[in-house]
Image (spheres, rainbow, N blue to C red):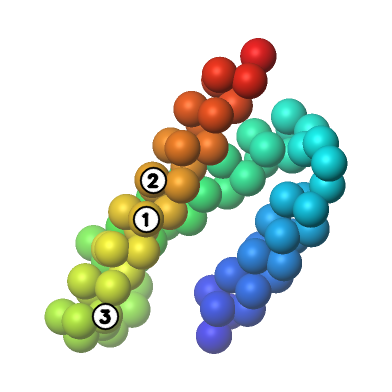
């Protein structure tokens, strides 16, 4: 439940930032950092056994971590090119 609530707030914040005509670099870098931390934390949660996940739950969390890592990589690449 806490992770879901965080994701709702984070998605709303990203939506607000994305509706701006110009996104500040520090805000964009913060989004990249949050995505990286989230992806790493998801993997750590699975590996450490913090939560009792089923096989399907484990696969979902790992796929979600991979998707978020890809978002972070795309954001990082875009920020590096926007110099």
Is label 2 in a helix, a strand or a loop? helix
Is label 3 in a helix, a strand or a loop? helix
**In terms of image quadrants, where is residue 60?**
bottom left
Point 21% across, 71% down: residue: 59
Q: Position of residue 31 (x, y in %)?
A: 63, 45
* Disc number lying in front (1 or 3): 1
Read off the residue under disc 1.
67
Is label 1 in a helix, a strand or a loop? helix
Residue 39 shows up from this direction: no
Residue pushed farthest left? 55
| Residue 70 circle label | 2
Read off the residue under disc 3.
57
Q: CA distance from mark 1 to mark 3?
A: 15 Å
Question: Which of the two discs, 2 and 3, labels the residue nearer the N terminus?
Answer: 3
Point 27% across, 63% down: residue: 62
Disc 1: CA contacts within 10 A as few (<14), some (14-19) or many (>=20):
some
Q: Are marks 1 and 3 in contact (CB under 8 Å)?
A: no
Q: Position of residue 55 (x, y in %)?
A: 16, 80
């Amino acid at each position: 439940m806490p992770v879901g609530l965080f994701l709702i707030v984070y998605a709303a914040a990203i939506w607000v930032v994305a509706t701006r005509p110009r996104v500040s670099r520090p805000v964009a870098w913060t989004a990249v950092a949050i995505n990286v931390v989230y992806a790493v934390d998801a993997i750590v949660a699975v590996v450490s056994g913090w939560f009792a996940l089923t096989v399907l739950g484990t696969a979902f969390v790992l796929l979600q971590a991979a998707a978020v890592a890809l978002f972070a990589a795309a954001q990082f690449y875009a920020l590096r090119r926007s110099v």
